[in-house]
């Protein structure tokens, strides 16, 4: 259950923040809900593709997450083949996520 809460917190953080500064890979031109083909037309091939897998909820709805990495510090996250997030500063995002995880662990440790 804690893992699910953390996952939702991370996804909420990613979708709420506006992290679209200038990008050497033209990620500032990528918009939410664009298809993978549309992104390829704008950005070209990613440096690395990461398939995070699929999960099916209790209603039978499946969510498939894929992350395309550009260089060392930029990414596009797709949910069910549509853009969900563009991050042009992964290092900053990782620091924020680490803070969330550390905070959740501290709360969990206090409850024991």
Image (cartoon, grey):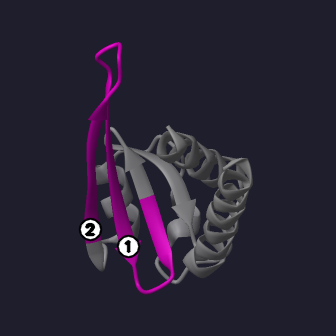
The reply to whether residue 13 is visible in this rendering is yes
Place residue 45 in its image quadrant.
bottom left
Mark 2: secondary structure: strand
Residue 49's tag is: 2
Is 16 on the left or on the right of 3, as rendered? right
Place residue 48 in its image quadrant.
bottom left
Q: Position of residue 74 (x, y in %)?
A: 50, 75
Is 62 on the left or on the right of 91, as rendered? left
- Measured Cα–Cα span from mark 1 to mark 2: 6 Å
Determine contact: label 1, label 2, CB under 8 Å.
yes
Q: Residues within 10 Å of mark 1 (few under 14, many from 20)?
A: many
Q: Which residue is mark 1?
A: 69
Q: Earlier in the sequence, mark 1 or mark 2?
A: 2
Residue at 49% across, 37% down:
1
Mark 1: secondary structure: strand
Residue at 31% across, 73% down:
46
Is 56 on the left or on the right of 104, as rendered? left
Q: Position of residue 47 (x, y in %)?
A: 30, 80
Which of 39/7 is in front?
A: 7
Which of 74/14 is in front?
A: 14
Q: Main secondary structure of the magenta part?
A: strand
Count up the numbered dots: 2
Q: Position of residue 59 (x, y in %)?
A: 35, 13
Classify 21 as above or below 82. below
């Amino acid at each position: 259950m804690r893992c699910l809460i953390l996952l939702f917190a991370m996804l909420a953080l990613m979708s709420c923040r506006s992290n679209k500064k200038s990008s050497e890979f033209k990620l500032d031109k990528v918009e939410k809900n664009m298809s993978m083909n549309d992104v390829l037309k704008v950005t070209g091939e990613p440096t690395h593709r990461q398939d995070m897998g699929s999960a099916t909820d209790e209603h039978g709805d499946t969510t498939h997450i894929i992350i395309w990495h550009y260089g060392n510090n930029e990414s596009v996250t797709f949910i069910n083949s549509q853009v969900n997030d563009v991050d042009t500063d992964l290092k900053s995002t990782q620091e924020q996520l680490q803070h969330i995880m550390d905070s959740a662990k501290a709360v969990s440790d206090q409850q024991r």
